[in-house]
Image (tube, rainbow, N blue to C red):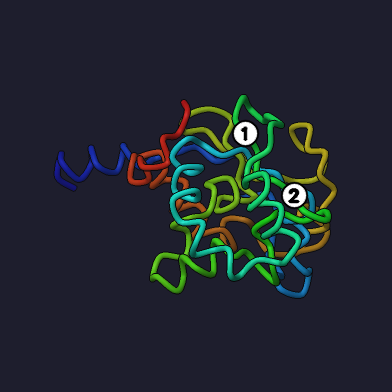
Amino acid sequence: MSPKQTSQRAQRDIEIEGLDSARFDCVYPSCGGICCVNGRPPLEEGEAERIEQNLAKFLPHLRPEARERIESAGHLTKRKKEGLPALAVSKGWCVFFNDGCVLHKVGAEEGEKWKYKPWRCVAFPLERTEPRKWFVRQWKLNGEAWDLFCLNPKESPKLARETLKEEIEFAKDLESGQESWRKLKT
């Protein structure tokens, strides 16, 4: 490997605790999108801006009550998570949920499925603890309070290292600056 390749690889390296022990397998759509129930991910400045600038693309795809919520009060709440505004919820669901993530669907139609999604949703169940350090969320690990069945290691025989390949690559891209438009707080 050349020095340039070694340097580029080092820039993409991240540490992910639990990859070889955690069990996870996303079974959407059979779960109904349970991670979007009361899903209120915090949005980085760039993510909130990108959603705001493209709301007209998303509105026709939303549930009527979610569209009404966004048109009357916006897609963010005053509620803060990690010091950032959180996505709004309508009737218990993320405002962008309608038989799946509308942000994901519109991005996929444009050829880039994660273009509009908050990075925390894209990376799930990976959680960032500090720059370049992540872990796989599991029941009761690191104070995990969310009791989603998919976070229960007894629900899947599959190792996270095998089922989260796309999410791992996304986290590496995020950390190496390829997703710099998201204006990630560090």
Give the left or right position of residue 142, taking residue 109 as reference: right
Residue type at mark 2 is Val
Whether residue 5 sits left or right of residue 56 in the image: it is left
Mark 1 lies on a secondary structure that is strand
Residue kind at label 1, given as amino acid type: Pro
In terms of depth relative to the viewer, which is nearer, 148 or 2?
Answer: 148
In-front residue for pair 133/106: 106
Whole-percent x, y for residue 22 in the image: 69, 50
Residue 124 falls left or right of residue 5: right
What number is the disc on residue 58?
A: none
Label 2 environment density (alpha carbons within 10 Å; few <14, some 14–19, many ≥20): many
Q: Residue at x 42, y 41 (%)?
A: 182
Q: Callout 1 environment at 10 Å: few (<14), some (14 to 19), or many (20+)?
A: many
- Helix, strand or loop status at disc 2: strand
Q: Which residue is mark 1?
A: 85
Q: Picture coordinates of residue 144 (x, y %)? A: 78, 38
Query: Percent position (x, y) of residue 58?
Result: 54, 63
* Residue that badge 2 annotates: 89
Compared to 185, does 76 lie above or below?
below
Q: Residue at x 62, y 33 (%)?
A: 85
The number of callouts visible is 2
- Of the pair 141 and 118, the residue shown nearer to us: 118
Q: Is residue 36 left or right of residue 162?
A: right
